Image (cartoon, grey):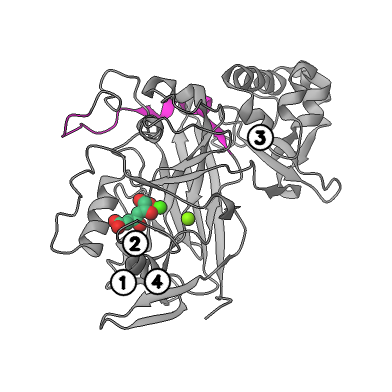
Amino acid sequence: MTWLDIPAGHPFGITTLPYGVFSTAADAHPRAGVAIGEHVIDLPAAVRRLAPELAAAVAGPNLDALLASGPGVWQALRAQVTTWLTDEVYRDLLSGHLVPAADAIMHLPFTVADYVDFYASEQHATNLGKMFRPGQDPLTPNWKHLPIGYHGRAGTVVVSGTEVARPSGQRRTPDGEITFGASQRLDIEAELGYVVGTPSRLGEPVALDAFPDHVFGVCLVNDWSARDIQAWEYVPLGPFLGKSFATSISPWIVPLAALGHARVSPPERTVPLLPYLDDEKAQPWGLDVRFEIRLNGHVVSNPSFTGMYWTGAQMLAHMTINGASLRTGDLFASGTVSGGSPGCLIELTWNGQQPLTLPDGSERTFLADGDEVVITATAPGPNGTVVGLGEVRGRIRSASVG
Ligand SMILES: O=C(O)/C=C/C(=O)CC(=O)CC(=O)O
Ligand SMILES: [Ca+2]
Ligand SMILES: [Mg+2]
């Protein structure tokens, strides 16, 4: 129990303690913070006062130093923050370092090194296969042998709240004409992102059970996708400009330590896996995370992460099995989460053939200029608590070209 007044069931209760980067009107320096209820702990200031031995890990304008400091420091800092918030002794000292969350301006929390996007939902892969490759098996022959992924564009990862300009590019019309212009099929993709802290050495794969030694935590990802640009460009090298214009992430990174109660076994594997991916005897890294997607304030879908075929540990093991090294700040995303209900509009409207009707009477197949999408998610915490993953929000503005 914390001495702070937090409404029961708050997604940022004492069992969450996510890390982000904020500034305020009074102090414009971006710095690390921990969200607790309707407040943010000014972490560098609190640590200088209460745990100076950890000061180096929370210094600087972002979470880069904390990510690089490794699991020992991550555990020590989380234990400290928990003690400050639960032991009355710290009440007066810590109160001076609490900022109202409403005053916090959130920034991109870490320097994104490499960005990789996977394709780990069997439901999503099956549906997209049917739409993009009609007449073929929806799942490609490799799908159940390895987590398929591609390298994205790290420099266009933006923090929640950043406006997204509608991309322009080449499309092919149904009668085969090649045209240029603003995307007419702009979509969302609700995903879970994994944030790498501890780097690895070139030439040394990261085994399944080393996942928590390297991954600091998770965030929410909206991998904006221009389906018309994507459908024309993607053969044979995969997604390119249809997905590289912007990827939004939530401002709060929830540490893996907060997700202990959310861990579940992934679905039964119907195809035997090679040893480096075989997690049958390993600790399971499936996660019971429930998403909610709102379009202009209206809930349009509630996908569940729980049945994702591939786990984060398998994605990491696969990403490094060739000896590719990890850097602090690498971000890898799960791919669209479409368990139970879809995590993108192309599935929700079945390739634009079944428009959604919003409560204001307007219809949507894909996103219109001015539309705002908010993705939130929660996971179960200990003793019936809720661990919130916060939100990733973005509004579409009109194309600047075309
Ligand atoms: O099936 C395809 O050709 C492509 C599908 C996607 O758009 C996949 C993607 O970005 C990964 C994902 O989010 O699942
Ligand atoms: Ca994606
Ligand atoms: Mg993207």
Q: Earlier in the sequence, mark 4 or mark 3?
A: 3
Rendered residue at 51%/53% (across/down):
153
Q: Earlier in the sequence, mark 1 or mark 3?
A: 3
Q: Earlier in the sequence, mark 2 or mark 3?
A: 3
The answer to which of 39 and 265 lies nearer the viewer is 265
Circles 1 and 4: CB atoms closer than 8 Å: yes
Horizontal placement of 61 versus 349: left or right?
A: right
Rendered residue at 23%/57% (across/down):
129
Q: Does the magenta run of residues contain 282? A: no
Q: Is residue 332 above or below residue 401?
A: above
CA gap, disc 1 to disc 4? Answer: 8 Å
Horizontal placement of 187 versus 99: left or right?
A: left
Please name the residue that numbered disc 1 is placed on.
Answer: 352
Q: Which mark is residue 234?
A: 2
Q: Does the magenta run of residues contain 269? A: yes
Horizontal placement of 258 versus 171: left or right?
A: right
Q: Position of residue 291 (x, y in %)?
A: 42, 47
- The amino acid type, in three-letter code, at marker 1 is Gly
Q: Position of residue 295 (x, y in %)?
A: 47, 63
Q: Which residues are magenta?
A: 253-273
- The amino acid type, in three-letter code, at marker 3 is Asp
User: On the image, which quarter does residue 20 sit in?
Assistant: top right
> Crowdedness of circle 1 by 10 Å Cα count: few (<14), some, many (20+)?
some
CA gap, disc 2 to disc 3? Answer: 33 Å
Find the residue positioned furthest to the front: 203
Q: Is mark 2 within 8 Å of ligand 1?
A: yes
> Crowdedness of circle 3 by 10 Å Cα count: few (<14), some, many (20+)?
many
